[in-house]
Image (cartoon, grey):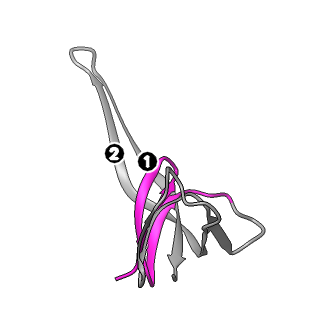
Amino acid sequence: MKYIIAALSGKQILLKDQNWYDINYIKNNYSNFITLERILCVRGEFGIQIGKPFLLNTYISGLIVSNVLGKKIKVFKTKPKKNYSRLKGYRSRYTRIFISI
């Protein structure tokens, strides 16, 4: 089983072949591809390679599928005994990428 562990947006993500992933929003007007250069670990047919902290001269490219909105988060503020309450909603933006190793 092939997989790659990459560092993206302050998180370590396990990337497998032929899957899509939601990462933090990337404003991208000019290209449909993204290059991931901060590779921590690669497991392939010939064993496992671990970087210290990253593997040199190793990168993976992914296809940017779309920009999507995440699940809605409701924020409710209230102050007791003051007749004050406020309800707001928030949807964070993500970039969906497709990885083929």
Earlier along the polypeptide chain: callout 1 or callout 2?
Answer: 2
| Mark carried by residue 74 | 2
Residue 32 sits in quarter:
bottom right
Q: Main secondary structure of the magenta part?
A: strand
Question: What is the distance, in whole Å, between disc 1 and disc 2 at their CAs?
Answer: 6 Å
**Is the Cβ of the residue at disc 1 closer than 8 Å to that at disc 2?**
yes
Q: Position of residue 62 (x, y in %)?
A: 59, 75
Please give the range of residues in magenta. Answer: 1-27
* Left or right of 79 on screen, residue 17: right
Name the residue furthest top. Answer: 81
The secondary element bearing badge 2 is classed as strand
Which residue is depicted at the point 44% across and 82% down? 17
Q: How many marks?
A: 2
Which residue is depicted at the point 67% across and 58% down? 27
Name the residue furthest front. Answer: 46
Q: Mark 1: which amino acid?
A: Tyr
Q: Residues within 10 Å of mark 2 (few under 14, many from 20)?
A: few
Picture layout, residue 61 above or below residue 88: below
Q: Position of residue 74 (x, y in %)?
A: 33, 45
Residue 81 sits in quarter:
top left
Which residue is depicted at the point 64% across and 67% down? 35
Q: Position of residue 1 (x, y in %)?
A: 34, 83
* Left or right of 26 on screen, residue 91: left
Picture layout, residue 54 above or below residue 17: above
The secondary element bearing badge 1 is classed as strand
| Mark carried by residue 61 | none
- As for residue 12 lying within the magenta part, the answer is yes
Q: Position of residue 48 (x, y in %)?
A: 40, 71
- As for residue 8 lying within the magenta part, the answer is yes
Where does label 1 land, which residue?
Answer: 90
Picture layout, residue 99 above or below residue 87: below
